[in-house]
Image (cartoon, helix red, strand yellow):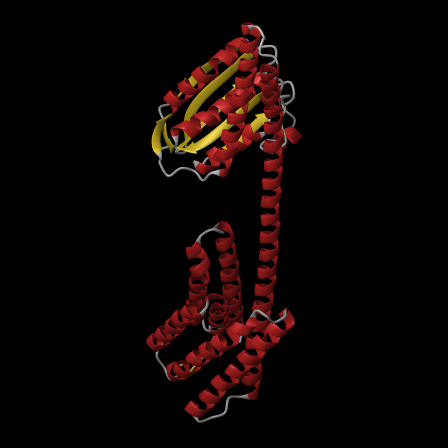
Amino acid sequence: MLHEGSNLLFNLLVILITMTIHQFWIESKPNSSFVKNYAILFTSALAIFLNMAFSFVEEDGIKFDLRGIPLWFGTIYGGPLTGILLTLEILIIRLYQGGIGAIIALFSTPLLLSIALLVRPYYFRMKILKKVMVASSIYILLSIFVLTSVSIVKDTFVGIEFLTSYLMTNLSGIIIVSLSLEAIRKNYLFRMKIYHSAKLDLIGHLAAAVNHEIKNPLTTVRGMIHLLKDDPSLPNDKKESFFQIAMDEIDKIDRIVSDYLTFARPYPNKIEMLPVGQVLSESINIVKPLADQANVKIEIKELSHCTIPGDHSKFVQALVNILKNSIDALPNGGSIEIKAVIRNNLCSIHILDNGVGMSSEIISRLGEPYFTMTSNGTGLGMMVVFKIIESMKGKISIKSELGSGTEVILSLPSS
């Protein structure tokens, strides 16, 4: 009896674990159609196999286990194809195991499949309590059918103690799994709702930030054009000055729109092998005039030979944005040290400045569209950096303390 009880608990544990695996799987790959369509098939098939391998009662070639529970829920949540494949799995395993119980399985398994397919169109319209009652009633009726078939095949009635134990086992199993599945599904849908709401909120903030930042330079450009139009007798040097102001503002708009498109567009399919040393040198050359003006020295301290897959222009843009932030953090001049090292098949790029530093609260807000630490920033720069590094399957970590400088670490897969 102890052995039977332990195997029964193992049957239930297997079903609950495979349910959890299924949920983790679909949540880790929310955009994968393969996972969405077939995760329930693979996890239910695993539960059926382990349940049939460890039946909690085996007598005269007849095996009693909870294989019907994953078949029921696999069919309900996975659809007809999943149900048919799971039914075939049960029949193949049961025929391989042999015994007179295989004959009963040939009738009871397709019967459960047929009932599940008939109930499925109405199942998701029911409330949780009704779902549990329907699943329990059907499963108990099927269990009675199996026990009756066993009595006919063995030409002897099963004992009342075993009858009660078997029915209570199946009833408790179907109730526990049904309630657990509904709770997991409800929590998952609630989290997805919050996730999509957060995305919509982010898009709203991003659109507002871009609108705000574009409106100011447009107003300036409009003013310059009016001045040039209303006073044709302006001296040439004044005209040149106004034209230059207008061009600078147009360039600013172009940068804002480029950052927005970088964040909004999917990562390009064209992937190159990028020598890190070459890309770092190119990025430093781009920001060198700005660094010289701010009296900031940029130096590569250590450079391992590593190559990473990615889009050249996008990665340069990410590095330039980080270097510009480091220069902004050095209002009285200073130094920026860069090193690239290989650790555990990852190319780690460290960008360290001795600037004003940041608090942990500020670090946690980096990348928000409204948040910037400079008077002329939009907050889009770091959003773009996070987006590009994430698209390259990399990670960003930031270490900083107020008054002690900041270190940005990019960890990227090395080829």
133 above or below 373? Answer: below
Q: Quadrant of the C terminus?
A: top left
Residue 260: % across, % down: 52, 33
Give the residue drawn at x 45%, y 76%: 113
179 above or below 372? Answer: below
Give the camera-side residue of 218 and 266: 218
Farthest bottom residue in view: 155
Residue 377 visible, this angle: no
Residue 246: image quadrant is: top right
Give the residue drawn at x 43%, y 78%: 109
Give the camera-side residue of 132 and 46: 132
Residue 369: image quadrant is: top right
Give the camera-side residue of 381 and 93: 381
Residue 378: % across, % down: 60, 27
Give the residue drawn at x 51%, y 82%: 142
337 above or below 156? Answer: above
Give the residue drawn at x 43%, y 71%: 80
Residue 38: image quadrant is: bottom left
Give the total of numbered labels.
0
